[in-house]
Amino acid sequence: MFPTTTLLTLSFVAIAYGQQVGTLTPETHPKLSVQQCTAGGSCQTLQRSVVLDSNWRWLHSTSGSTNCYTGNTWDTSLCPDPTTCAQNCALDGADYQGTYGITTSGNQLSLTFVTDGQYSTNIGSRVYLLDSDDTTYQMFNLKNQEFTFDVDMSKLPCGLNGALYFVEMDKDGGKSRFPSNKAGSKYGTGYCDTQCPHDIKFINGEANVLGWAGSDSDPNAGTGQYGTCCNEMDIWEANSNGAAVTPHVCSVSGQVRCEGTDCGDGDERYDGICDKDGCDFNSFRMGDQTFLGIGKTVDTSAKFTVVTQFVTADNTTSGALSEIRRLYVQNGKVIANSKTNIPGMDAFDSITDDFCNAQKEAFGDTNSFEKLGGLKQMGAAFETGMVLVMSIWDDHAANMLWLDSDYPTDADPSSPGVARGPCPATSGVPKDVETQSPGATVVFSNIKFGPIGSTYA
């Protein structure tokens, strides 16, 4: 995630949010099967499920159905302060398909961008993979492992992001660390990432009501005094016009609530505890504009397979993470990753600390990735355990131009690193995307993980 502000990590329209557990809507997690593979290439199917992030859910009074949060405003009678709000407000179950446009079938998950429900119009969604207990998050350590999935993003235009990534959330969503959080991972609590988002309504079991200000561009969102930070591995941020794989790191381990300079907001972007820019490998940005897109080498008008390998220095699961490799499979053909074609850079085709340092120097970017620990820190986060996230979203902070167009918008597009995709600089405005592409959908399927070389043929 790259937006230059943390105004909104994802865009959504919902009624309210919280930490207690309501009983007005049953919570039934959609089933999703995944596969765990062994070195010989044999894969075992695991029955799992997904859960909707708590930020999308209806929050109402524990004594009835009065909204605790409407539009972008808290009900001050129910939420006069962070702890009272957490006591007064109940987080309820979700109608995954009818309200949020989330469906599963076997090993396939479909996320639809705009869904007109019975009571509201929902925009975007974010789900997490649950473990076999259907209550706590599945935790991943991918050191010396690979992670593979199929994706169909043929219906994702400029300005949208169908994302699959990992963040260092608590396995139980913070329920054991923060007793005021009664809902926990079963209701999708505890989100964090390296943008240290301030739009999360409840952090550390308390309502983020202090200093809350409604968004100027989104009538259903706002930001509070606190952000929520953790290490983040963006396996896949993409639409049909471009894609990026990006590790981001923080100086802290696990989910941490931030305020002030630590959050890295605005002019303090590079003074915070997390690396918001990350070290991205976007083929278009790295000089190969023919590699990925509609009708290109990796043809985004059809489904394909994405393979990401996490190589350690000693080729063991306990070694230091030293390289992140990427390859693709489409129509039965294995496609090697593109190589960098940037003046002053060697021809890299994977993410290493050397690649990151060379990229930052060539593009004139601040190297906060190296400052905060680089790939070694990313590996340490995997050792702690990371949660799989899948989402569809639009971008109220930067119109997704950092992914699929020229960015920053005031920079010369011919300068190295500015051109990130073919989309117009005027694209990606949320109100336009929401009205012009409500049926946009991303489909993730056939998720596999295991030793390097075990998940694809």
Image: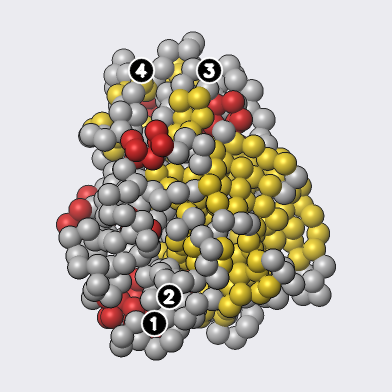
Q: Amino acid at mark 4?
A: Leu
Within 10 Å of the Cα at label 3, are there few (<14), some (14-19), or many (20+) other Cα atoms? Answer: few
The residue positioned 31% from the left and 85% from the top of the image is: 343
| Upstream in sequence: badge 4 or badge 1 | 4
Mark 3 or mark 4, which is nearer to you? 3
The structure residue drawn at horizontal position 34% and vertical position 82%, both measured from the top left corner, is 342
The label on residue 445 is: none
Vertical position of residue 162 compared to residue 116: above or below: below
Residue 288 location, quadrant: bottom left
Q: Secondary structure at mark 4?
A: loop
Rendering quarter of residue 224: top left
Badge nearest the viewer, 3 or 1: 1
Which dot marks residue 118? 3
- According to the picture, the residue beneath numbered tag 2 turns out to be 288
Q: Which residue is mark 1?
A: 341
Near-viewer residue (37 or 137): 37
Note whether 181 is above or below 138 in the view shown: above
Q: Distance of mark 2 from mark 4, alpha carbons?
A: 54 Å
Alpha-carbon distance for marks 1 and 2? Answer: 7 Å
Residue identifier under label 4: 78
Q: Are marks 3 and 4 in contact (CB under 8 Å)?
A: no
Q: Is residue 117 left or right of residue 252?
A: right
Q: Position of residue 253 (x, y in %)?
A: 44, 61
